Amino acid sequence: MKKTILVFSLLIIALIIFFQLSQYSMVSGNLRTEIGIALIAIVFFIIGVYINKKTLHKSVNTNSEIDYKKIEQLDISKREYEVLQKIAEGLSNKEIAEHLFLSESTIKTHVSSLLVKLNAKRRTQALQIAKEIHIIRN
Amino acid sequence: MKKTILVFSLLIIALIIFFQLSQYSMVSGNLRTEIGIALIAIVFFIIGVYINKKTLHKSVNTNSEIDYKKIEQLDISKREYEVLQKIAEGLSNKEIAEHLFLSESTIKTHVSSLLVKLNAKRRTQALQIAKEIHIIRN
DNA sequence: ACGCAATTGGTACTTTAGTATGAGTCTTTA
DNA sequence: TAAAGACTCATACTAAAGTACCAATTGCGT
């Protein structure tokens, strides 16, 4: 993407130079004006690309970005959320316990309360719901 | 690629128009020059936005599309894939059995072979792997 | 027609997951 | 400082999930 923009810019500049050269004979002294106009065009082009990247990133991320408000609303604590993320990675309770330096029973406690808060019956359903409400990344 | 060429052509046309405008406006006064510059700025801005939207769209779709070749490569059968999808919906084996009008033991058989083929130890891990290799939608 | 892979299903068993309950520690806040 | 909420952990269960084998049926291609 960056390469595309760069190449475009370079080509535009080349074109401008070409026009510049051809116009030397036709119109006498507007070189600076036209370079200015060209610069404006390039700048606005880049601005357009940049703005769109930002806004699209937002809308794209709306699907993959995390709705922290929802997490609060559901009263999910930090630890519970960490466990949820580990579940999403496909880890077992025992493995999660090892990752977080906790006992397996603690993980079970967290998982159980997660299931209640997410209104799920199983961890897989919890994942599906969590994705649906944008609490975890896809 | 075709889009790139199209956009490129548009850019060149826009450039030509803009030079044309600048040449005319040199003769006939400052007001039109400024309008011309503004138009050029807007046109290039729009082109920038357009290009970025197209390219980003592509990359987004790449992430959410299913790699059917991979499914074949992994030797995953139709039924197994159906079961995988149901797992992704967060259903239990019993629920999957009801959805597909099969017995729970059949589902277990399918799940087991899925786990082997996906090299997973648990259904949650199978989901994570399946997403990673673009076998199921996010 | 024969063989092969896919599909289905069962039994028996082990391993995870999940529930219920109780309890101790720690931090924050009224 | 006392109450509240978050975090931790344990025990004792029940319920799913997953494994290992075996076996019957079906469809498809040679």
Image (cartoon, coloured by chain):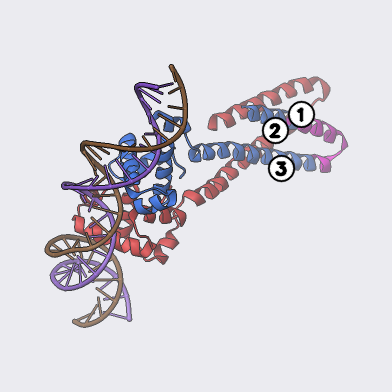
Chain colours: A red, B blue, C purple, D brown
In-front residue for pair B108/D29: D29
Question: Could you say whether the residue bearing mark 3 is in a helix, strand or loop?
Answer: helix
Residue B37: x and y in percent read: 75, 40
**Chain letter, disc 2 residue:** A
- Which of the numbered marks, if any, corresponds to residue B42? 3
Give the Cα distance between marks 3 and 2. Answer: 13 Å
Numbered mark located on residue B60 in the image: none
Marks 1, 2: nearer the viewer: 1
From this view, report whether residue A134 is shown above or below residue B108. Answer: below
- Taking the magenta stretch, the answer to whether it contains residue A15 is no
Question: Regarding mark 2 in the picture, which secondary structure is present there?
Answer: helix
Main secondary-structure element of the magenta-colored stretch: helix
Answer few, some or many: residues within 10 Å of disc 3's Cα (few below 14, many 20 plus, some between 14 and 19): some
B86 relative position to D19: left or right: right
Magenta region: which residues? B15-33
Using residue B37 as the reference point, say whether residue D5 is left or right of it.
left
> Residue beneath label 1, please?
B16
Inspect the image, locate mark 1, and give the three-letter code of the amino acid beneath it: Ile
Residue B75 seen in render: no
Query: Circle 2 is placed at which residue position?
Result: A38
Question: What residue sits 85% from the left and 39% below the top?
Answer: B29
Q: Report the Cα–Cα distance between label 1 and label 2.
A: 11 Å
Camera-nearest label, 3 or 2: 3
Q: First in sequence: mark 3 or mark 1? A: 1
Q: Amino acid at mark 3?
A: Ile
Residue B28 is covered by the magenta coloring: yes
